[in-house]
Amino acid sequence: MTHPDGRNMLTTAQAAARLGVKPETVYAYVSRGLLTSTRLPGVRGSVFDVDEVESLAGRDTARRTDIGAVERIRTRITLIDDGRLYYRGRDAVELSSRTFESVAQFVWTGELVDGAQFVADPVVVQRCRDALGLLSPDCRSIDRIRIAVDIASTYRPMRFDTGSTSVVREAGQLLLTVAAALGGGSSELMIAESVWEAIKSDTSDPNGRVVLQAALVLMADHGLAASTLGVRVAASTRANLYSIVSAGLGCIDGPLHGSAADPVHRFLTTAIDDPIGALATQLRSGERVPGFGHVIYTDRDPRAEEILRLLRDPAHGADPVVVTAADTIIEEVSSRFEAFPNSDFALATFTLAYGLRADTPEMLFALARIVGWTAHALEEYDEEPLRFRVPGIYTGTRPGTY
């Protein structure tokens, strides 16, 4: 069935990727009667029924479909297309002007309601703060988030209810609890306000909260990234919300995912006073300039563009010296290597422009991504359980050779 909003339909590029062929081959399948192409208002090119594509994939490319369920994950949450990021069909950049709570509710339920608010138990928030107070003063924010999630879970005896209504309620409470525990303020503050309390310094301009709110929204989900795939695997075993969040946190705790902004922050720190000199030193070392390019985007990262645009607005109080240095680096790298800044570069610039905690990018990434992980868990709970059983290829010692 063709829905007017395009549900259960694949673009030509998506169909080609699923079948492992070129787009021209997809249209050859149409001419041979193996696929049916459809046009939708507002959508460029043809679209194809996902079940029809899957049927063809199973018949013509069994080698690909035998490897497991990973490449057959269907999601209605996030689309990355033509250099733009969409949550449930709405442009994430446009959504970034709304509150984090409202966008989270939209990502989970499909209902966009202004003024959405979450509720947290102040007693549980305090218990989390007490536990965080026992950690090393120099521990990373992601460690603090992990501990807060675990502590909060012990106060939720009904966390094993994986029904959508219960999961959405638990997710809102968890986000607010963790943010309030990190920030040390009232549990009635909005999430962005609590996070700001956790990361700001004495010199941070409070108008930076506008940029922070946008960054949280823009980092909420990004499709089937490694951590999100880990979350869906956990959800397929019917792990509860707190456990799937822990699975996601474990996956992003590495230099190639959640900590990818660390080298950008270190580089930009050296570049504030002399961006050209820092860039020359970086190039002389033979190392690439961190914070540029992306495995998904080809010519622009819309998340980075919006965060940097907000930082350039004088009304938001970002340090103009930092912003100018960042823009100088962007101009030089873009003109010499045809590269573009990614979200790691933008978050590192944001951190330095307001004098925030050095691990702010990692904290924002982890906290914001709880929204996307929850949405993907909700989808996975509706699938057959334990569907992720990918057969490995044994290359060890053969039996009988001893």
Image: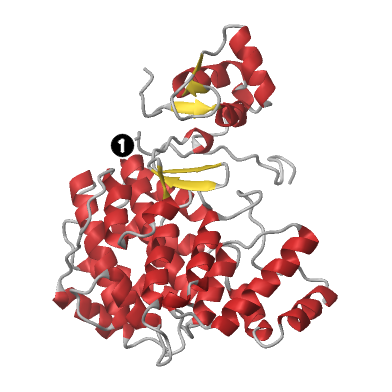
Left or right of 343: which side holds 110?
Answer: left
Residue 259 lies, in percent from the top left, at 55, 69
Left or right of 325: which side holds 37?
Answer: left
Residue closest to the far front: 314
* Figure check: 85 above or below 173: above
Which residue in the protein does label 1 denote? 382
Picture residue at 66% right of the left edge, 59% below the top: 340
Within-10-Å neighbours for mark 1: few <14, some 14–19, many 20+: few
Residue 224 lies, in percent from the top left, at 49, 47
Q: Is residue 260 visible?
A: no
Picture residue at 60% right of the left edge, 48% below the top: 296
Residue 132 lies, in percent from the top left, at 32, 83
* Figure check: 293 above or below 398: below
Picture residue at 20% right of the left edge, 59% below the top: 115
Residue 32 lies, in percent from the top left, at 62, 7
Picture residue at 61% right of the left edge, 29% below the top: 64
